[in-house]
Image: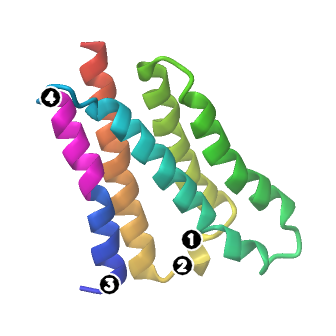
């Protein structure tokens, strides 16, 4: 398995572990708050991965604004109630993936990396959705 895949899957472990710890809490540990922090960090990282693509384009502003907006919106969502924060973060991960398609970045990705991105995004969105359902029920 390529190192990129290993690192990608390792990056999912906190999402999965913190989701489980939200369902089965440890006394004195706010797993949901940690999940939201980790989510914001990873969203910023994934949006930052788009930055090198800017330099390869004639018109960088739309992609630049898109990439910078996602982590800023995620940060601002942290001021909302937990359910709203989870919803915004879920939507931002979906927006990131859709933005990669919209800006035709998928065509620049190696097919194996594109498949990995789709898998990782699906798991991350699934974790957000599961926690959101947990809060609503």
> Would residue 16 be counted in the magenta stretch?
yes
Residues under labels 1 and 3: Cα distance?
20 Å
Residue 109 got which mark? Answer: 2
Q: Which residue is mark 3?
A: 3
At numbered mark 3, what does the secondary structure look like: helix, strand or loop?
helix
Question: Quarter-wise, where is residue 112 in the image?
Answer: bottom left
Residue at which label 4 appears: 25
Disc 3 packing (10 Å; few <14; some 14–19; many ≥20): few
What residue lies at 41% left-to-right and 37% top-to-bottom?
36
Residue 100, compared with residue 137, is above or below; it is below
Contact check, label 1 and label 3, Cβ < 8 Å: no
Q: Of the residues under marks 4 and 3, which one precedes in the sequence?
A: 3
Of labels 2 and 4, earlier in sequence is 4
Q: Name the magenta segment's main secondary structure.
A: helix
Identify the magenta region. 13-23
Residue under the point 77% across and 81% down? 56
Rounded to the nearest whole Å, what is the CA distance between mark 2 and mark 4?
39 Å
The image position of residue 124, as x and y in percent, is 35, 48
Which one is closest to the eye, mark 4 or mark 3? 4
Badge 2 element: loop
Residues at marks 4 and 3, CA–CA distance in whole angstroms: 32 Å
Image location (x, y in percent) of residue 34: 35, 38
Task: State the residue lying farthest toward the front.
Answer: 28
Q: Residues within 10 Å of mark 1 (few under 14, many from 20)?
A: some
Query: Which of the two discs, 2 and 4, sits closer to the camera?
Result: 4
The circle on residue 106 is: 1
Q: Secondary structure at mark 4?
A: loop
Residue at position x 54%, y 20% from top? 80
């Amino acid at each position: 398995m390529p190192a990129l895949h290993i690192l990608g899957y390792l990056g999912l472990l906190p999402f999965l572990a913190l989701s489980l710890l939200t369902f089965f809490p440890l006394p004195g540990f706010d797993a949901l708050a940690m999940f939201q922090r980790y989510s914001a960090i990873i969203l910023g990282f994934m949006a930052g991965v788009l930055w090198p693509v800017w330099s390869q384009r004639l018109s960088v502003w739309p992609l630049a604004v898109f990439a910078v907006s996602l982590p800023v919106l995620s940060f601002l969502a942290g001021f909302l109630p937990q359910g709203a924060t989870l919803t915004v973060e879920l939507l931002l991960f979906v927006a990131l993936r859709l933005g990669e398609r919209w800006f035709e970045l998928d065509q620049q990705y190696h097919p194996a990396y594109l498949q990995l991105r789709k898998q990782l995004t699906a798991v991350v969105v699934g974790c957000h959705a599961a926690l959101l359902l947990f809060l609503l029920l």
